Image: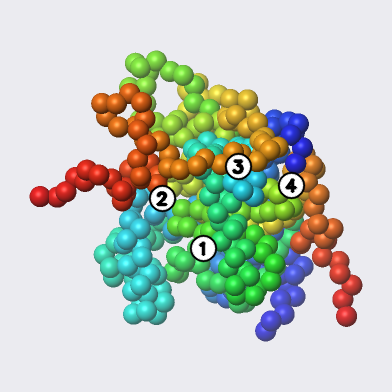
Amino acid sequence: MSDHPAPRTARNIPALLLALRQEEFNGAVTVSGSPGGTIHLERGLVLAIETPGTPTAETLLLRSGRISEAAWNAALAATGSTDGRLERALIAEGALSAAELEIICAAAAFDGAFAMALSTPTGWQVTESATPPALALRPGLEPQQLFDETTHRRTRLTALWGPPAELSRTRFRAATRSGNEAARIHHRHQDLLAAATGRNTPRDIGFALGRGLFAVMLDLARLDARRLLHADQARPADTAPSVAPRTPPAGRPTATVGPLPRRTPGHHAPAAQHAPHSPTTPAEPPIASSTEKGQP
Amino acid sequence: MSSQVSSASLVAELKSLRERVMGISESVISTTDGLLVAADTATVHPESAAALTAAMLGLGTRTAAEFGVGELRDVVTRCSGGYVLVLAIGRQALLMILGDEGLDLTALHRESPAAVRRLADLLGIELPPSPGVSSRSVPGA
């Protein structure tokens, strides 16, 4: 049962997944690489893909603001009454509809497959006992569906921009544009332009905005075609703050005796008071303050 | 710590780490007492990060000692929107890494020992002879 002779000899991940689909395998495939990831399977169908390369369904929901942190936590707390299934809890709590959840989970799985296909894996491991994903699509997707969609996406981006792997590594910076031009940019694109600082790759922008990798790459390719982006590296001289290393002074600092001088309104010279410290945190009124703004 | 370290080379090392590990967004090097040394940041305030990093390490070390769970390796704070990690560069400096929720922890664990070693070289810090994970070649039983 625990031995998988066919998958072990698989030539690549797609061949492995097709073999596991034949077997109706339950478990996960952990892929190493950059990025690697975990493909969760149930009866050989893909329930979810977790990879550092693209946001998971959880990130898509939370970062985009579709679900509030409070609603998410409430659903987590309610999983006790839904057999530990977060999807059911989210629907039961009314956070979102079953259809919407299904769409988000499927989108995250397709993006995961696409993100992992951008690099060559260095190895993989098939495990029957893996930590289940936070959100899963049930029933899962046929592996073949994922391959077809990934191929389609790669073709689309190649036609529009160039090699998808190169696009995924490009750090775009928004070009300066006239006010007239800015008015004609869709707000979805404006968010992207605001996030394109020259530091972040499309994947980073996806995580920051709660959008899938492919959607971000497609939009960036379109914006680049409109000459609204520069595909250059961030200039380290500009981004780096003053970082002169400091060493503590050689001698011991002279100790200040007595309380710190305080400035009082109406007096030009600071007058010494008995307060041990001047107030530094505006949120907290100083204890030794002589005039308190009492509440009526 | 040598006072004539080129900050540009430290920032270049931080930038290179950010580019090699998916999900790292910003990083700060500070002394163990919370003074800023170098930073590769976009949104965080480097001085505040340096101060907090020292506090995180202090709390981590104290907690580890209190509960007798051995030597502190690193401090990891996991939040709904990402990670904050603090790694020691020898006994004098600290590296704080800020990452999003998709931070590639596997890649970070692979890349960080070498990055810490290079930063230690640049800063003129001598690392202990067995720097954690990378050279755990203690002859067993």
| Farthest-out residue, left | A296
Secondary structure beneath dot 2 equals helix
The amino acid beneath tag 1 is: Ala
Closer to the camera in the image, A43 or A287: A287
Q: Residues within 10 Å of mark 1 (few under 14, many from 20)?
A: many
- The chain identifier of the residue carrying mark 4 reads B
The amino acid beneath tag 4 is: Ala
Marks 2/1 in contact by CB < 8 Å: the verdict is no
Closer to the camera in the image, A65 or A101: A65
Residue at point 61%, 39% (across, down): A253
In the rendered image, residue A265, in percent from the top left (x then y), is placed at 27, 29
| A66 lies above or below A236 | below
The residue labelled by disc 4 is B115
Q: In which quarter of the image is residue A263?
A: top left
The residue labelled by disc 1 is A48
Give the alpha-carbon distance from disc 3 to disc 4, as whole Å. 20 Å
The residue labelled by disc 2 is A63
The answer to which of marks 2 and 1 sits earlier in the sequence is 1
The residue labelled by disc 3 is B35
- The chain identifier of the residue carrying mark 3 reads B
Give the alpha-carbon distance from disc 1 to disc 3, as whole Å. 43 Å
The amino acid beneath tag 2 is: Arg
Mark in front: 3 vs 4: 3
In the rendered image, residue A48, in percent from the top left (x then y), is placed at 51, 63
Residue at point 57%, 34% (across, down): A199
Left or right: residue A124 versus residue A278 is right
Q: In which quarter of the image is residue B129?
A: bottom right
Give the alpha-carbon distance from disc 2 to disc 4, as whole Å. 30 Å
